[in-house]
Image: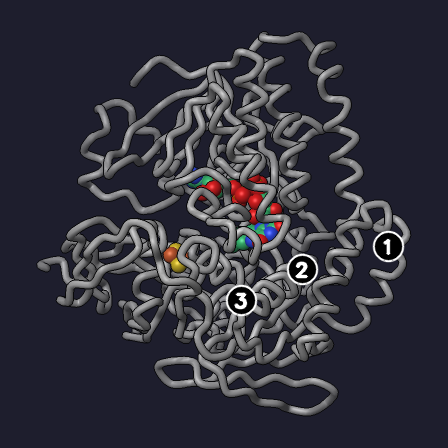
Amino acid sequence: MNAPRELVIIGAGPAGMAAASTAAGLGVDTLVLDQQPAPGGQIFRGIGQAGPAHLELLGSDYQAGTERVASFVHSSADYQPDTAVWSLGADGELGILQRGEARMISARRVVIAGGAMERPIPFPGWTLPGVMNAGGAQVLMKSSRLVPLDGVVIAGSGPLLILLAWQYMRAGVAVQAVLELAPRKNLWRAGLRLPAALRAGHYLTRGLGYLLALRRAGIRVTYGVSDLKAVGNDRLEAVTFRTGGREQSLETGNLLVHFGLVPGIQLTEAAGCRHQWNDGQQCWRPQTDAWGNSSVDGIAVVGDGAAIGGAVAAVHAGCLAGLEAARALEHIDAAERDRLAVNDRQWLQNDLRIRPFLESLHRLPETLLSGTADDTLVCRCEEITAGEVRAAVRAGHRDPNQVKFITRCGMGPCQGRQCGQAVANIVAAACDRPVSEVVPFRVRPPLRPVSIGELSMLESGNNTA
Amino acid sequence: MFRRLQTHQGKVVTVCVEGNDVRVPAGDSVAAVMLAMDLLPTRTTAVSGAPRAPLCMMGVCFECLIEIDGVANQLACQVQVSEGMRIRRQHGAGDPAS
Ligand SMILES: Cc1cc2nc3c(=O)[nH]c(=O)nc-3n(C[C@H](O)[C@H](O)[C@H](O)COP(=O)(O)OP(=O)(O)OC[C@H]3O[C@@H](n4cnc5c(N)ncnc54)[C@H](O)[C@@H]3O)c2cc1C
Ligand code: FES
């Protein structure tokens, strides 16, 4: 193993790029690792190859990425793409996989900026080819200019639904319907949070602009939808749902679903960081202080991987974590850190004012979180149904980790990333306990399958797992 | 089904998909190639043989498992195409002999 780096940052999205530029700019020896082939994170996927027409099509939020990526690339941070981190210890030791070779490296300080993933919500038919995550389909558009050929239904809840519909509309895609599955009563709750949200009003104006443009184009956004089902044999043929008391059906070959984002907590779990339930966002998050420091000394976590705040908040939080790293590594003192942090702290606070409004507007009902029908698959890998999870609870296994052990639910290749939250919700509901009191799946490295061939490159004695 | 927005003008590479040579944009992931060619399902499951296709496109769902250059269980959404790459749909756990 080589000498430890001063700072290793996991993730080259908005948060990681900002942390890296800041820390490197203050003289910190900074290494940035990302499993993607190019910097930018989820929001700016494919931005390096995007021509002017593509940039124009995807809108102003995406265009902002050009500058962000350029300033990161010009910083003195050492950036290594195509590098996946598959283990992280509390001591700052990382297992990385690069060009088919597994290696261990170590860092005096680690900033996790791994971002979020789309919240998996099991519903009947969600495993059929033709059903994809909306953000995933958006990746196809950003990176490969692929859009649905003949019609698409977009369903779920969250700002991304409307954004994607708007982008597709501009690309000439036939958007058959946008189905909002959050209950109508959310509007009242969100209304109470509107005054505070007005202070980050540009988000509201933009969202309303997208909605108006969709309406003008005759694209239907239906609210108060329930009972979403994907129907088909080997492939999606139709989408059925209920609205206004009536069952409806739409023939389509593409259903794109999105139920908001949740922090990816694999790395923080592996490192032993403390987590807490975030009721506003209906998910777990690693505990952090104002600088992004986790409960484990020397490990910080920022951006959507800490709590969903969006790309702009991720940048400011990244800058703060970069400053804190420079302080902890003694490149600057605390007074200097505080002085340099003033603007980012203020901007971060301002930007986050929109969140309580969005969270109450898109708050998911218990029917979606824990009400999955008994015959619906919860674990896509091991093919375990919601009914089997409930049966395990009835048999006395009143904890997700016991359910996992008994049913194999969560033991497949995705290691519970897709079913973990659903299982926690179902177990909590079956035990009549709040989900915040349930212990989620424990995470063990390797965080992604590493083959024997890949591991053979590890020097003996460096095995952390 | 998916279609490309503009005709691609950048670099292309030739890959072999299910035994047929095709020219694809150099920046594509293997999953993008399969979706562009509408080769769904991209795999069947090991447990019940059910059809599956890429879901998340960001390396977290493991639904896009596929055989690349004879090695099964690769993440199609995380691997970029390269000249001469051989791509095959995966049936069940993947044939270790292939
Ligand atoms: C699929 C998807 C689409 C989205 N689309 C939009 C959009 O169009 N507009 C919008 O405003 N917001 C969008 N968002 C939300 C937006 O991505 C985030 O708000 C923002 O990017 C957060 O920045 P970040 O730096 O925290 O994380 P990210 O941008 O997610 O960056 C995290 C980076 O870490 C890397 N990483 C994670 N784990 C590892 C590991 N173990 N090893 C190596 N690298 C790792 C990832 O490859 C990624 O590049 C989207 C989110 C998702 C998941
Ligand atoms: S599509 Fe989800 S891991 Fe590849």
User: Mark 2 packing: few (<14 Cα in 10 Å), some, or many (20+)?
Assistant: some
- Judged left or right of residue A454, residue A212 is right
Task: Find the distance from the CA under tag 1 to the CA under tag 2.
Answer: 16 Å
The answer to whether marks 1 and 2 sit on the same chain is yes
Looking at the rendered structure, the secondary structure element under dot 1 is loop
For disc 1, the marked residue is: A193
| Vertical order, A117 against B35 (above or below) | above
- Judged left or right of residue A403, residue A119 is right
Question: Is ligand 1 less than 8 Å from the beta carbon at label 3?
Answer: no
**Chain letter for mark 1:** A
For disc 2, the marked residue is: A159
Depth check, front residue: A16 or A90:
A16
Residue under the point 44% across and 80% down = A253
Colour convention = one colour
Identify the mark nearer the N-term, 2 or 3.
2
For disc 3, the marked residue is: A171
Q: Position of residue A295 (x, y in %)?
A: 61, 29
| Vertical order, B91 against A206 (above or below) | below
| Vertical order, A308 against A420 (above or below) | above
- Judged left or right of residue A366, residue B61 is left
Residue type at numbered disc 3: Ala
Residue type at numbered disc 2: Pro
Residue under the point 22% across and 69% down = B91
User: Mark 3 packing: few (<14 Cα in 10 Å), some, or many (20+)?
Assistant: some
Depth check, front residue: A203 or A324:
A203
Identify the mark nearer the N-term, 3 or 1.
3
Please identify, in this view, whether the residue under mark 3 or under mark 1 is nearer the observer: 3
